[in-house]
């Protein structure tokens, strides 16, 4: 068996989230169900590398990482992903960061 990747020395919460609500993102890797996605078998592919989605929520995990809820519209569901598993497709929308109503 391979080694388990551990990130015990990484804490993203000292910085603002890398992505913002509504931002268009692309998956940098294939994501399989680890048992936390209801209605799918463990090991089923949920997201393929290159799939496009939109950030719909930002939470935290283990007081260490930001977890982005990404709505993959083409699949019809949302998947929680770490920032390192995503890349921006477009810059953050102007209205999402300026705090001023249009």
Image (cartoon, rainbow, N blue to C red):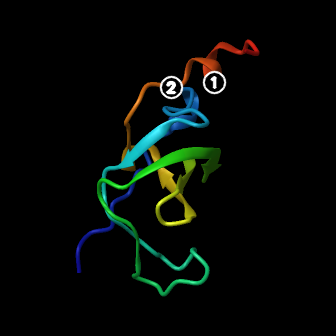
User: In the rendered image, is residue 10 in sight?
Assistant: no
Q: Quadrant of residue 64?
A: top right
Q: Residue at coordinates 56% horizontally, 44% vertically from top-left?
A: 55
Of the pair 68 and 65, the residue shown nearer to us: 68
Q: Secondary structure at mark 1?
A: helix
In this view, which residue lies farthest toward the bottom? 41
61 versus 100 height, above or below: below
Q: Quadrant of residue 101?
A: top right
User: In the rendered image, is residue 46 in sight?
Assistant: yes
Q: Secondary structure at mark 2?
A: loop
Percent of width and height locating residue 96: 63, 24
In this view, which residue lies farthest toward the right? 101
3 versus 94 height, above or below: below
Percent of width and height locating residue 71: 55, 54
Of the pair 65 and 93, the residue shown nearer to us: 93
Which part of the image, by quadrant, shows the C terminus? top right
Q: Quadrant of residue 20?
A: top right
Percent of width and height locating residue 100: 73, 12
Label 1 – label 2 distance at C-alpha: 7 Å
Which part of the image, by quadrant, shows the N terminus? bottom left
Count of labels in the image = 2
66 versus 49 height, above or below: above
Q: Is residue 51 left or right of residue 55?
A: left
Residue named by callout 2:
92
Q: Residue at coordinates 57% horizontally, 74% vertically from top-left?
A: 36
Residue named by callout 1:
96
Q: Residues within 10 Å of mark 1 (few under 14, many from 20)?
A: few
Say whether marks 1 and 2 touch (CB < 8 Å). yes
Q: Residues within 10 Å of mark 2 (few under 14, many from 20)?
A: some
């Amino acid at each position: 068996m391979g080694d388990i990747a551990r990130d015990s020395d990484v804490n993203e919460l000292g910085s603002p989230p890398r992505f913002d609500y509504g931002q268009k993102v692309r998956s940098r890797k294939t994501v399989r169900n680890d048992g936390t996605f209801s209605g799918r078998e463990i090991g089923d592919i949920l997201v393929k590398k290159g799939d496009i989605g939109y950030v719909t929520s930002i939470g935290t995990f283990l007081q260490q990482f930001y977890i982005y809820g990404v709505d993959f519209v083409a699949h019809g569901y949302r998947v929680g992903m770490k920032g390192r598993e995503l890349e921006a497709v477009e810059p953050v929308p102007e209205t999402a960061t300026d705090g001023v109503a249009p």
